[in-house]
Structures are given as structure tokens and as C-alpha cells.
Amino acid sequence: MKILYDSDQVTTRITEIAQEIIATYPDKKPLFVCLLKGAVPFSSQLMRAITRLDSAFHPEIEYMHVSAYGNEREATHATQYSSIADDIVRGRNVIVLDDCLDRGLTYNTAKQHLLGQKATSVELVVLASKQTDVFNRAIPLIAGFETPNVWLVGMGMDDAATAPEAQRWADYIGHVSPE
């Protein structure tokens, strides 16, 4: 396993992302949607950074479970489960928070669901964006780090092929794939 971004680098970048969101949405109250399970560590740190930087921002967060990997290292198709009520989403600017943008399957599935619930807009903010050759992949509003196209771990990204939840809760971003 190789560390790409240590804990201090991750914390610094999440604070910068919080600043970008505050600047982008100064008069709007976006609804944050955290994609479970991977985005939980990132979302938690991001919400704390936003409120630390702007105590009047009051971020509102909901959760949606979307998975494309299961216990493998290859994305197949995205399966989505949501209990977010339509009246919470309707007419809102939504920011989907995810740990990693790979092929874009989870974001596309979440976006279609949220637009179906009448969101005004749906944007993506990711902690890591893999450099892939996927054509027509979503472009995030904000990407914390551009990473090589390797299997990432830490800050929500796990290596379930090794063990359930392996390395998900680490406070760094690393990889277990050869470069």
C-alpha cells in the first residue's frame, strides 16, 4: 500500500473545498446528499469545515446508498436505495458528495433519481477523481484530488476484496494497485 495524500494534505484540501462551496453558494441553501458508505468520512469533515468557516451557513445533509462495486475491484452497474423524501429535494440545489469519481456510475444514478425528485440542479463534489479514459464521464463541480487510475483506499474508499471495510476509515488516501 502506498500513501498518495497524507492526513494533513486531506484536511487542508477539504478546508479549501469548504471555502469553494461557501463562495459558490453564498445566498443559496444547497442540500448535500452523501453517498453511503464511502462519502461519510469526507462529508463529515466537510460539514465541520463549512460550519467552522461560516457559522451562518448551516449545511443540511441527507444520505443515499448507491453502490457500483460490491465486494469487487471492478464497477459493474450502480444499485441505488434512497429514503430521501421528494419534498426535501424539490426545488433545491443539490450537491452530491462522493469519495471517488471513477466511471461515474454512482453519480449518474444518484443524479437521475434526484432530478426525478425535482431538484433544481444536481452537482458533484468528490474527494478524489481518478484519471480515467471513460468517455462522457461527469465533470465534478469540485474535485479534491486528481489521482491515478488505481484502486484507492482511505477516507471512505475501502478494499472490500481484502476484507469488509478494509482501510475505509483511514485518514489518508492511498492505493493498493500497482502503478
Image (cartoon, rainbow, N blue to C red):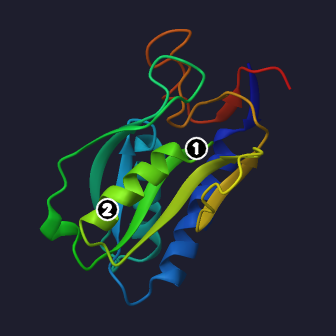
Residue at the (38%, 35%) spot, across then down: 37
Q: Quadrant of the C terminus?
A: top right
Residue 54 screen position, x and y as percent? 42, 77
Asked which quadrant contains residue 140, the reply is: bottom right
In the orientation shown, which residue stands out farthest toward the right? 179
Asked which quadrant contains residue 117, the reply is: bottom left
Is the residue under label 1 in contact with that under label 2 (CB below 8 Å)? no
Q: Is residue 131 left or right of residue 74?
A: right
Q: Which mark is residue 100?
A: 1
Q: Mark 1 is on which residue type? A: Cys
Residue 98 screen position, x and y as percent? 49, 49
Please determine whether, in this image, residue 5 is positioned above or below residue 13: above
Q: CA distance from mark 2 to mark 1?
A: 19 Å
Q: Quadrant of the N terminus?
A: top right
Residue 104 screen position, x and y as percent? 56, 48
Residue at the (53%, 60%) spot, across then down: 125
Nearer to us in this view, 86 or 37: 86
Q: Which residue is mark 2?
A: 114
Question: Sequence-wise, which precedes: disc 2 or disc 1?
Answer: 1
